[in-house]
Amino acid sequence: AVPSAAFFGQFGNVQDLDTTLNSLRNVGFDDVFGVARGSDVLTALTRQALSQGKLQKPCISSSCPVCVELILMCFHGLKENLAPYIPASHIAAKMAREEAVKKTGLKSEEIGVFLISPCPAHVAAVKENLYQNDSGIDGVLSVREVGIKVMNLRFDEVDIKANYKASSLGLSCAISGGEVEGTGLDRVVDVDGMENVVKFLKELEDGKHPELEFVELNACPGGCVGGVMNVENGYFAKSTITRLCREVMKGSRNVTDFADKTYDYYTIADKWKVNNAYYKLDEDFAQAFVKMRKMEDARQQLPGRDCGMCGAPSCKDFAEDVAQGKANIQQCIFINSDDN
């Protein structure tokens, strides 16, 4: 399992990271490798490249796939400002696979690596290969579906077999502003929420804020803790992450993974290309993002039986119809029966 840093913010009643980390073993995963470790590598890469003048300023983080798509589709003048790096989740997945091969002696293709994500955009990014680099991710699970299973555990009975590894800065990347903090630069800004992101990108394209070195963008309010596939309220999740970051800083485990591979390991293979997966929802990208969130919210409420009773061939197709305003979720007979 490769859990997003936001995953650790879902359990406010759990006092330490080790318990949450090892709870994933208790629900069926053989090992766990946090995305926060990939964040440590990514921020170190960005910091070094900016100090060496290798990136065009202001450099725009490519961590949020929604914001990457938005720039590619609507802000062509800022395309060259996008950092050429794959996101922390992909870096962590590649590192996790390599570590698993060393630990188990199994072949790479015999190991399954699953990202636990707070946002459906990461699902699309993997399926459509937005980052043009082998992510090493075999599947994407939502924080919600895994988190609900974890919540059914008795945390005092979780067997601690592994310790959490990553810095407080890596963990803080679950929150808007975590990535800019990790770069250690002064002339930086973080923007979250789709409307705010669009407004700020318009200002950048108009030549405003030339003094900036680095820009972090998050489509979800508050960052990844605000993702639609989370369990916990984003504000509570942020509070939990902040508390856990303080605990990491107090201890002796505030360690950072460093970039020790070739440049190609961390970068996109070619120039940025538009992912057409969003076009089928709406020609206006901002509206497509809103509909994507509605679609995922509807999908989470549906039973996943693909019975066809609603008239759609699958629950996924029905969720898309709901997002497009072509259907009402109450047309699902199973939701109706639950209500009655």
Image (cartoon, grey):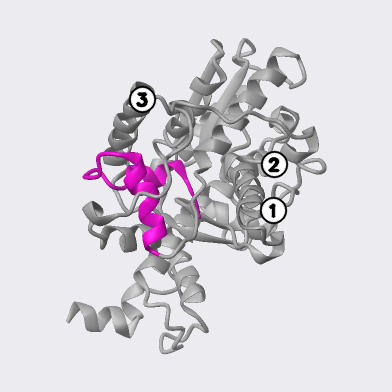
186 to the left or right of 156: right
Tell me, yes or no, whether the highlighted magenta stretch contains residue 182.
no
Q: Residue at x 73, y 30 (%)?
A: 77
Q: Find the distance from the CA under tag 1 to the CA under tag 2.
A: 9 Å
Q: Nearer the viewer, residue 50 or 339?
A: 50
> Which structural element holds mark 3?
loop
Q: Residue at x 39, y 48 (%)?
A: 21
Q: Where does the magenta region start and end?
A: 1-27
Give how far across and how far down residue 44 sits, in percent.
62, 24
Question: Which amino acid type is marked by label 3?
Answer: Gly
Q: Find the distance from the CA under tag 3 to the CA under tag 1.
A: 42 Å
Residue 165 in sight? yes
With respect to residue 51, does 44 lie above or below?
below
Residue under label 3: 251
269 to the left or right of 150: right
Residue under label 2: 72
Q: Nearer the viewer, residue 318 or 20?
A: 20
Count of marks placed on residues: 3
With respect to residue 37, does 247 lie above or below?
above
> Which structural element holds mark 1?
loop
Residue 288 in sight? no
Q: Find the distance from the CA under tag 2 to the CA under tag 3.
A: 42 Å
Give how far across and how far down residue 14 sits, in percent.
25, 44
